[in-house]
Image (tube, rainbow, N blue to C red):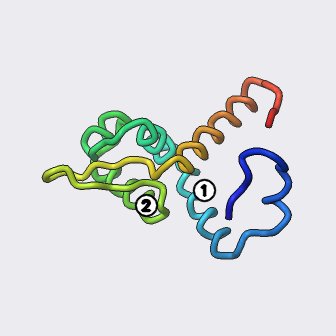
Amino acid sequence: MRAREHGSTTEPWRQLPSGEHVEAAVDGFRMLADPTRLRMLWLLCGDEYDVTTLAEKVGIARPAVSQHLAKLRLTGLVTVRRDGRRSVYRARGGHVRRLLFEAVNAADHHLTGKPDHD
């Protein structure tokens, strides 16, 4: 499923996505509904982190970070790669980065009263 970058903004919205796509999107949004996971994913949009460094940045215990990362991986929001003996995590691509940025930007508009725009 692909939306046009330019041109008609109504085209992708004329047909409902498949049930499989809806369920996968809902799972992703469910993961973002947790403040800790949202903060972690925000950091992972800008750089790669191992569990220890991410735990220090968000101020929670390493086992909790590992559990959150496992959930984010299962829903396809983060990727992991091995760097020697440690695992390094990062947000999975531009779609995830744009989704998170737009969610926080929409919250900013709501909180500050800035007008909506396309």
> In the picture provided, is 3 more to the left or to the right than 58?
right
Binning the other alpha carbons within 10 Å of mark 1 as few (below 14), some (14 to 19) or many (20 upward) gives some
Quadrant in the picture for residue 49: top left
Residue beneath the point at 47% across and 61% down = 76
> In the picture provided, is 44 more to the left or to the right than 104?
left
**Amino acid type of the residue that numbered disc 1 sits on in the rendered structure:** Phe
**Amino acid type of the residue that numbered disc 2 sits on in the rendered structure:** Lys
| Extreme residue toward the bottom, this view | 19
Q: Vertically, is 96 above or below 26? A: above
* Front-lying residue, 93 or 5: 5
Residue beneath the point at 62% across and 36% down = 104
Label 1: element kind: helix
Quadrant in the picture for residue 26: bottom right
Q: Vertically, is 89 above or below 105? A: below
Q: Choose the circle earlier in sequence order: 2 or 1.
A: 1
Instruction: Estimate the x, y position of residue 89 in percent, counting from the top left.
Output: 34, 49
